[in-house]
Image (tube, rainbow, N blue to C red):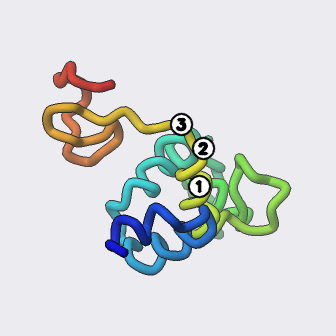
Amino acid sequence: MTVFDSIKNKNIDELVDWIDEHFDFDDAPYWHFWDENHCNKCKPVVCTDEDGHKKEYAYCEVYGNCEFFKDMKETPNNKQIIKMWLESESEKVCTDCKHFVGCECFDGGTCDNFG
């Protein structure tokens, strides 16, 4: 059996475990998915510090869970985020450079090859 066959034969939970074990890095595509669909849409929470200065924080920093998943006690963990990403609609990927929308090196829209 090839590595590819082994990957294709995994159920979603096995694939989530495999991705989490082998591809946990800051620039992973599931983090772009999470940022684009959740973190970047999160409204900041304004707090006042002991000196009276106002500062903006992310909802999760203040409350310990995600604004979009308030019923969860904590912000979703890596495996939960990976599973959401795998179950989401396919990301738009440039057919030329292979970058996806949201990628740090994506220049914001000059490439017309997304589909």
State the residue position of label 1.
58
Among numbered discs 2 and 1, the one appearing first in the sequence: 2
- Can residue 49 be spotted in the picture? no
Q: Which mark is residue 89?
A: 3
**Residue 13 placement, left or right of 65:** left
Instruction: Name the front one of labels 2 and 3.
Output: 3
Among numbered discs 2 and 3, the one appearing first in the sequence: 2
Q: Quadrant of residue 71?
A: bottom right
Residue at the far top: name it.
112
Distance from label 2 to label 3 (Cα)? 21 Å
Q: Is residue 99 above or below residue 4?
A: above
Q: Residue at x 36, y 71 (%)?
A: 25
Q: Which mark is residue 42?
A: 2
User: Which residue is more in the foreground, 63 or 91?
Assistant: 91
Distance from label 2 to label 1 (Cα)? 7 Å
Amino acid at circle 2: Cys
Q: Quadrant of residue 57?
A: bottom right
Q: Which mark is residue 45?
A: none
Distance from label 3 to label 1 (Cα)? 26 Å
Amino acid at circle 1: Ala
* Mark 1: secondary structure: loop
Among numbered discs 3 and 1, the one appearing first in the sequence: 1
